[in-house]
Amino acid sequence: MNNKRKRGDADADADCVSQGPPKKQRRRHSDYTIGWICALPLEMTAAISMLDEEHDSLEIDRNDTNHYVLGKIKSHNVVVACLPLGEYGTNNAANVMTNLKRSFPSIQEVLLVGIGGGAPSQADVRLGDVVVGIRVMQCDFGKVVGDGELRRTAAHKLPPLVLGTALSVLRAKHPSEKSEILSILEKKLGETSDYNRPDSPDLLFSSTYKHVPSAPDCSRCDHMKLVPRRERKSNHPHIHYGVLASGNQVMRNASKRDEIARDLDALGFEMEAAGLMGNFPCLCIRGICDYSDSHKSKEWQKYAAATAAAFAVELLTVLCGTQTPAREDRASETANRTKRDDHRQTLMESLSFDQLESRQASIKAAHGTTCHWLLRSHEYKDWLSPKKLKDHHGFLWIRGKPGAGKSTIMKYTYTNLTGTLGDSSLMACYLFNARGEELEKSMEGMYRSLLLQLLRGYPELQSVLDSTSGKDGRWVSLNVLRELFRVAVLHLGHAEDLASYVTSRLRTQDPVLHQELLAKASGVFLWVALVVDVLNKDYARGGMSQRRRLAEMPGGLHELFKDMLKRDNSHQEHLLLCVLWVLCAKRPLGPNEFHHAIWIGLSPRGLADDGIPDVTALDARERTTACVIGNSKGLVEITKTRYPRVQFIHESVRDFLLKAGGLQDLWPDLGFDWEIPSHERLKECCFAYLQHDLIEKALAQLHRTAAIRTSFEPGFYTIRKLTYTRDSKEHAEHYSSLL
C-alpha cells in the first residue's frame, strides 16, 4: 500500500525540476523497450527530469487512455506513464499497464517508480532511502478465519529474471562503490530544485504514539516518544532489497504496519505493484517518504520520488541495452544465431558418451571372404529393395547361437553398405554391449547414439534441438530422446524435399550455396521459396555474389518479409495500395479488379497513365500478373483456381503486417487505428473510379450489354462495397455526404 496517496493537491506537487532534457528526432513505437510507470504527478516530474533526451510524442491506440512522455536514458528508449489524477491502487495500475502494451507492444521491461511508506525494522529504513521490491506481496488479499482475522493467502510476485540479474550486479558493486544516486541527483536536478533533500528532520515515533490531531506537522508531537536511532555518518540514501507489501488502502496505522511487516517480512508499503505484477512482471522501486503511520506529511515526498528515480537510472545503466529492430536487425540476427548454435553444440556434446563406439571398435573384422554369402542371399537383397518394404518393414533379423559371429556379420554389413551408398546417404549403427557400462546396454544409450549420428550426418536437422533443454549429459527422460528421434526422422523427409526444391529451382549450381541456404532455412519451406526467387532474379541480372547476397538475407520469415519490402524503397505507394486492397476489401478481388484498383489509386496522383488498363487485350493476363507480383514485391499472388482471386502468398504475411507490427513499421503514418485511414484511402479510389468518364458511360450502358461488365469489373465491386466499413455508425456521415 502506498504510503502517501491522498490526491487532493497532488497536482500542485508536480513542479518543474529543470529546463528538461533536449528534444531529439521522432522515433517509432517499436524503438521503446522500457516502461516507467508512476502513480503521482510528482513522481512523473522526477522521472522526466532523469531523461537524457526527450522525444516527440507518437500516436497511440485509439483505446489507450494514457498519456506518455517519451525519452532516452543511457542506451534505453523509455516510455513514462502516470495513473489518472486522483486514481490509485492496484486496479488502476493494471489498466495503465494494459494501455501501455497496446500502444507500445515492444516494451520488454517495466519499472514502477515512486514513493512509498517505510516499515521500521532491523533493516533501519529511513526517509529518503530506497526500497527495491525483489518480492511483492498483496497484503489485503486472503480469507477471514473464525476470529475475524485476515489470513493472507496471496503468493509473492517476483520481478523479471533480466531485472533480477541486473539488480544482482548493482548490489554486488555497492559494498565497494557507493551508489550513484546523489551524483545523479546533482547532475539532473541542480542545487536549487524542490526535489533535493529537505531540511525537515527525519522523525520516527513509537508505534503506540499517534499524531496530534489536525496538526500540519510534528512540531507539536511529543518528541519524548521518538524511537532512538544511531545517527548516520552521511545523508547518502541507503538502498534496501526485500519485500514490499502492496494493497489498495493507504497504510496509516503503525500497529497494523508492524503486524503486516512482521508477517510478510516487509520493508515498506505501496499501492500499485500487485496490480501490475499479476499480469506483467515488473520491478517496484520506492523512495521512502514516511513511516506508514499517522505522522504523515508531504515534506519528504519529492525527495523520495527523486531518489527512487535516480536508482532506476542507475539500474538502467547496468541493464544491457536492447537493440531495436529498426537499427539492429542484422546484429540481433547474428547474436541469435550464435546463441542458437552454442545451444545446439552443447546439446550435441551432451548426447555423446565415452563408450559410444567402444563395442563396434572391439568387434573384429570379418576374415577373408567369410561373410560374402550374406550379400548374395535373397533375404538380404529383399531387405535392400524398396519394393519389398511392405513385406519386411525394413527389418532384417540375423539369428544364431552365442559366439556364432552375429556381431561380426553386422559390422561387415554396416561397413559394406557405407562403402556402397557413399556420401549421398547416411548410415547409422548401434551395437548393444551386454558386458559394457550402463549406457552401452540401455535404450537411452541407443537413442543418444542414433540421434547423434543422424544430427551429425544432416546438420540441418539440428533445429529439433532448439526447443529442448538438456545439459551436462543429463537428459530429461527416455521419452524426450525417443520423441526427438521421431521428430528428426520426420524432419529428414522434409529436409529432402527442401534439398530437392533447391536443386531443381535455384539457377546457381553452387553446392556450397545450396548447403548454406538449407542450413539458414531452419526447415521453413516458404522462406526457401522466397529466397530462391530473390537469388534467381539476382542471377538473371548478372549478379556474381550470390553467397554474400544470401548472407545478407535475414533468417526469420517475418524478418525476410521486412527485408523484401524495405530493401527497395521505390514504388511504396504501389505497395501500400496492394497491401490495403488485400487487407481491407470486403471480399478478395479478381485479377482484373485488382489491376484496375491499383491503377485508379495511382492515376489521380500522377503515378500512372490516364488510360484505363485494357483487361481484354491479348497480353492482359501477363500485364495483370506483372502488376500483382511487381507492385506487391512478391508477397501477393493470383490463385490458380477456376475463379482466380488475389491474396497474400501465405497467411504469415498477414500475421507479419498485423500481429508483428509490420504495417506500422513500414507506414507509421497509418497509426495504430490503421483501418480508418485505410478504408478512407480505398473509399477515395472507389469514388475516383465512379467519376471517371469511361466508367460513367459504361454504367449508363450497363443494361444494354454484358460485355461492359468484363471490361470494367471494379465498377461493380465499387457499387456494392463502397459503404462497407468496420464501424458503419461511426463513419456514416462521411459516406452519406459521399453518396
Image (cartoon, grey):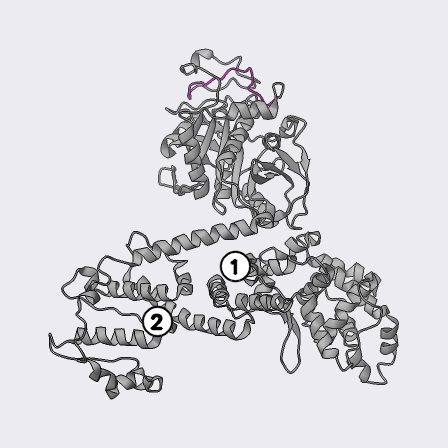
Kindly report the distance in space between the C-alpha atoms of the residues bearing marks 1 and 2: 27 Å
Q: Residue furthest left?
A: 402
Q: Nearer the viewer, residue 254 or 725?
A: 725
Q: Which residue is mark 1?
A: 555
- At 29% from the left and 62% from the top, the residue drawn is 448
Magenta stretch: dominant secondary structure: loop
| Relative horizontal placement of residue 174, taking residue 415 as reference (left or right) | right
- At 11% from the left and 75% from the top, the residue drawn is 402
| Relative horizontal placement of residue 381, taking residue 128 as reference (left or right) | left
Rendered image quadrant of residue 56: top right
Counting residues from the start of the chain, the first of labels 1 and 2 encountered is 2
Q: Residue 418, percent across and down? A: 30, 73
Q: Could you tell me which quadrant the C terminus lies in? A: bottom right
Q: Vertical placement of 210 versus 437: above or below? A: above
Rendered image quadrant of residue 367: bottom left
Q: Is residue 11 visible?
A: yes
Q: Looking at numbered disc 2 in the image, what kind of residue is underneath it?
A: Leu
Q: Residues within 10 Å of mark 1 (few under 14, many from 20)?
A: many
| 202 drawn magenta | yes
Residue 84 — which label?
A: none
Q: Residue furthest front?
A: 368
Helix, strand or loop under label 2: loop
Q: Vertical placement of 209 versus 648: above or below? A: above
Q: Which residue is mark 2?
A: 426
The magenta-colored residue range is 194-208
- At 51% from the left and 15% from the top, the residue drawn is 201
